[in-house]
């Protein structure tokens, strides 16, 4: 099993230049950043990921959303796949064993199916309503998340509408990490907001930021 930071930050191009966003997230203390740019060409996304890797801290990890080819060519820490992407089993055949493979699930059956795949972690959600994805799947709620966490042998990254106001309840369901988009990126000072998230977890939740399964 992999170790994964409890804050899974996403540099989403819908909020600005993902290279600049990633720089601010890392500067604020995030140590795992997913690069999401749904509208970028393969060349553009590759260039962005390479640029981010040049300033990412030594203990930081960069995950590429959807594009295993970009993760492979750039030397990123790994790739995160969605339900409509190529199957994880096929991607694992071409991805080195030391690169992380994550997979999105939106229901208990999908999560149980992912148990049979060579993935390192699963994302489960949306836990709450979210505005960052126009085609978001139905909300699974805390009960749905709790059931997935209780039956999954993989670390579970909760995603969808997660804020400081509800993160404590999400962790209580057994989530290893929380993927946060708008509650980080909608602020003018993303670095400061990231620092606030890190303080929140240590002061309010009383938990370290590194999860080891």
Image (tube, rainbow, N blue to C red):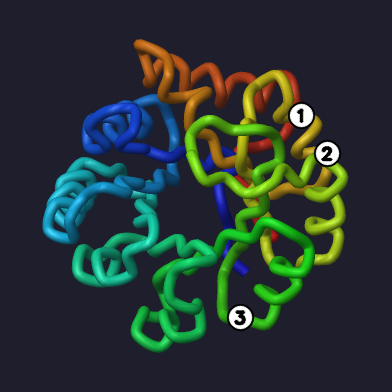
Up the image or down, 195 lies above or below 86; here it is: above
Q: Residues within 10 Å of mark 2 (few under 14, many from 20)?
A: few
Residue at image x 57%, y 45%? 136
Chain-order first, disc 1 or disc 3:
3
Q: Position of residue 162 (x, y in %)?
A: 64, 31
Q: Name which residue lies at 61% across and 43% down.
A: 159
Q: Is residue 18 above or below residue 114?
A: above
Q: Earlier in the sequence, mark 2 or mark 3?
A: 3
Q: How many marks?
A: 3
Q: Residue at x 61, y 38 (%)?
A: 160
Toward the front, the furthest residue is 135
Label ID, residue 62: none
Query: Which label is found at residue 117?
Result: 3
Q: CA distance from mark 1 to mark 3?
A: 29 Å
Structural distance between the alpha carbons of marks 2 and 3: 26 Å
Q: Give the label on residue 168, or none.
A: 1
The answer to whether the residues at label 2 and label 3 have Cβ atoms under 8 Å apart is no
The quadrant of the rendering that contains the N terminus is: bottom right
> Is 100 on the left-hand or right-hand side of 165?
left
**Depth check: 61 or 115 in front?**
115
Q: Is residue 169 left or right of residue 25?
A: right
- What residue is rendered at 18% in x and 47% in y? 48
Quarter holding residue 118: bottom right
Residue position marked by numbered label 2 in the rendering: 172
């Amino acid at each position: 099993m992999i170790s994964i930071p409890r804050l899974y930050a996403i540099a989403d191009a819908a909020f600005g230049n993902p290279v600049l966003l990633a720089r601010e997230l890392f500067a604020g203390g995030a140590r795992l950043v997913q690069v999401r740019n749904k509208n970028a060409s393969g060349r553009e996304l590759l260039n962005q990921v390479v640029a981010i890797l040049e300033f990412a801290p030594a203990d930081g990890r960069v995950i590429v959303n959807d594009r295993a080819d970009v993760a492979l060519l750039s030397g990123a820490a790994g790739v995160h796949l969605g339900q409509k992407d190529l199957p994880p089993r096929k991607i694992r055949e071409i991805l080195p064993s030391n690169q992380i493979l994550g997979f999105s699930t939106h229901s208990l059956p999908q999560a149980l199916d992912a148990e049979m795949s060579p993935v390192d972690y699963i994302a489960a959600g949306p836990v709450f309503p979210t505005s960052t994805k126009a085609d978001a799947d139905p909300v699974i709620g805390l009960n749905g998340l709790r059931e997935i966490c209780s039956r999954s042998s993989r670390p579970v990254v909760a995603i969808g509408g997660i804020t400081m106001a509800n993160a404590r309840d999400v962790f209580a369901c057994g989530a290893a990490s929380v993927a946060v988009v708008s509650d980080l990126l909608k602020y003018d000072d993303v670095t400061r907001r990231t620092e606030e998230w890190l303080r929140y977890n240590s002061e309010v939740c009383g938990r370290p930021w590194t999860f080891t399964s």
